Amino acid sequence: MDTIFIMGATGFIGEETARSHIAKGNKVLGLARSEASAAKLRSIGVTPVMGDVYRPEEWLPKLPKIDYAINVLGFFTDGMPARFSVSHAEKCCEKYTRWIKVTIDLARRKDIKAVVNVTGTTIFEDMGVDWVTEETPIRYTPSGFNRVATPATKLCQQAIAEGLPLIIAVAPSVVYGDKPTSSFDEVFVKPLEKGQMGVVGDGKNYITTGHVEDVGRAIAHITDVKYAGEFFHIADDQPVTQREFVTSIARALGKSRVMTMPRWLVAILGGKCAVEFMTLSQRISNAKLKSTGFTLKHPRFLDEVGDVVRSMRRARAGQKLQASPA
């Protein structure tokens, strides 16, 4: 049994990662900056470590012996913005870089086997219709969420070059699941429900997806010192075009059609980063991950999305019912 420490274990991906490690028989510790977060961690079998990621000097020296650490803090850890503007990305970049510095400090501990850092496909080049693999060049152009991740990516590359035991888990650009208020719900489902979202441009670019259960399982799977220094793409078997992605969610919501929106209009309404994210074309290959023996439970987004969206809406309705006065 290994002891795993997770930063971000209360999040959408983090919770599934924690559950996956517990299912493997590991002991899981999770960073919690509030009593509410600590209670949530306990409810899923995770032991809370009280502390704030922005004040590591208060908890890092007191951290008990651990075998592995995982950073799965996401772009929206501190809340969802109204617009994904360049100025918002710059603010996120500062915070995101601070998280990576804490992650690398964990990797410098002499008693740790390895540290897993979870990032996104945005760090790789736009390859159009060609497959993106772990050998595809890293992208340093400021575009989309890469405006947030670039400095952190460089720090990770430097740490690996120094010989630190760092493993990079590259999560898909869209992680989906039926949890209400998740990033999938807030960024895609709710706006489509309200008629506030459509296909951006011609919609022919490729979007790579992954079910949150598979993403969490994959992160747990590669939490192994033998993978130190390596990158692993986590993705479905079959990427979809942006148009397929948007229209499949809309159909699950009972809508027969979705509007097509020009890039300039989306930039005004949603922010420049939103346009850049939605029009990035990446067909991510999961061949390397699967070569390690990992198998997907949810291999195709188009086969899953209908049930996922309907389950999410039922869960939302149940939450409203519980919250309503008797």
Image: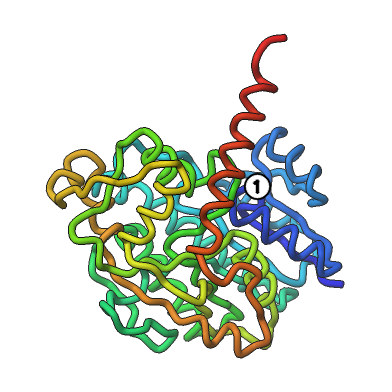
Horizontal side, residue 28 vs residue 222: left or right: right
- Where on the picture, by quarter, is residue 141? bottom left
In which quadrant is the C terminus drawn? Answer: top right
Depth check, front residue: 320 or 31: 320
The residue shown at (73%, 40%) is: 40
The residue identified by callout 1 is 10
For the residue marked with disc 1, what is the amino acid? Thr
Horizontal side, residue 273 vs residue 264: left or right: right
For label 1, the SS is loop
- Residue 61 location, x and y as percent? 70, 57
The residue shown at (66%, 29%) is: 318
Depth check, front residue: 220 or 189: 189
Density class for disc 1 (Cα within 10 Å; few <14, some 14-19, many ≥20) is many
Q: Is residue 13 above or below residue 124?
A: above
Q: In this view, does 217 lie above or below 253?
A: below
- Residue 80 location, x and y as percent? 42, 40
The residue shown at (76%, 56%) is: 29
Horizontal side, residue 118 vs residue 326: left or right: left
